[in-house]
Image (cartoon, helix red, strand yellow):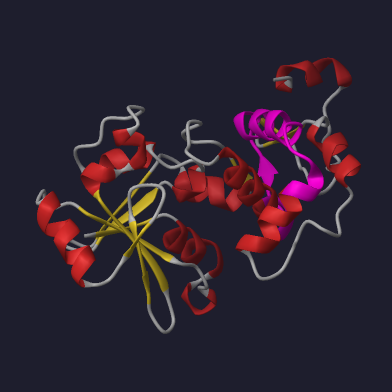
Amino acid sequence: MALIGGAIRDVALKGGENFRSDLDFVMFDGDLPAFRSLMVSLKATPNRFGGYGLRFARWKVDIWALEDTWAHTAGHKRVETISDLLDCTFFNWDAAIFNLEDHTLHTRKHYLSTLRKRVLEVNLLANPNPKGSLVRALRRGRLWNTYFGERLTEFTRAEIRRHSWDELLTIETTAFRHSSLATFDYHQLLQNLDRPCWVDGQMVTKPFGSDPRQLELDLKDRLDP
């Protein structure tokens, strides 16, 4: 079994004492019928993305069989080992896996450096819930003061125009206890997405704040969808 994604990200960003994330696990023993029987016996709740949800007193846990990884079943990525999961997360910050059996950590190249620079980027664009991914991206930009890489900027600019701001706020307040977006001006957000800047040689935007290193206007077209 392996722990993947948000828990590793949050510990790397804020330390174990501040950990508040849900837990996402993947099982990879190759016995899919046994895994599904186990989930039934535990009264786990199937989710929309091929996994199962479990509730504990302190944690919300989601668990998948390796073979049921959405990117694999949808035909976007071939998944045969846990390392293949590094190519299956929507965000680059979630591309981290801790193998509980041999205590090894698997990450994308420059993972810690990307966290340190606070550059959030798209890892795999295809995903089963673009609206939800947009809301999560906006929340991370707002709460964590992050920069958006070029691909995430393009995704955000395209998706945000497909939905009303009220619709996105409703999704956020339904999924999360507190809204982080309601107090921010939607039009200012759109303007910020049109203002690229540099972070250590990488072109990014800062959706929820200006940056003194803004590029000249003639470079802005590179971020157009």
Give left or right: position of 218 versus 44: right
Give left or right: position of 128 versus 224: left
Name the one closer to the observer, 198 or 135: 135
Q: Is residue 82 visible?
A: no
Name the one closer to the observer, 14 or 166: 166
Q: What stretch is highlighted in magenta?
A: 141-167
Q: Is residue 104 visible?
A: yes
Give left or right: position of 56 versus 202: left
Instruction: Examine the image and state in which quarter residue 5 appears.
Output: bottom left
Instruction: Examine the image and state in which quarter residue 177 appears.
Output: bottom right
Relative to 35, residue 60 above or below: below
Query: Principal SS element in the magenta part?
Result: helix
Q: Which residue is drawn at 42% across and 76% down?
A: 59
Give the number of callouts: 0
Q: Which residue is drawn at 31% across and 43% down?
A: 69
* Quadrant of image for the N terminus: bottom left
Instruction: Examine the image and state in which quarter residue 3 appears.
Output: bottom left
| Residue 114 belongs to the span the image colors magenta | no
Report x, y in % for residue 40. Answer: 22, 65
Give left or right: position of 95 versus 40: right
| Residue 161 belongs to the span the image colors magenta | yes
Q: Residue at x 55, y 51 (%)?
A: 115
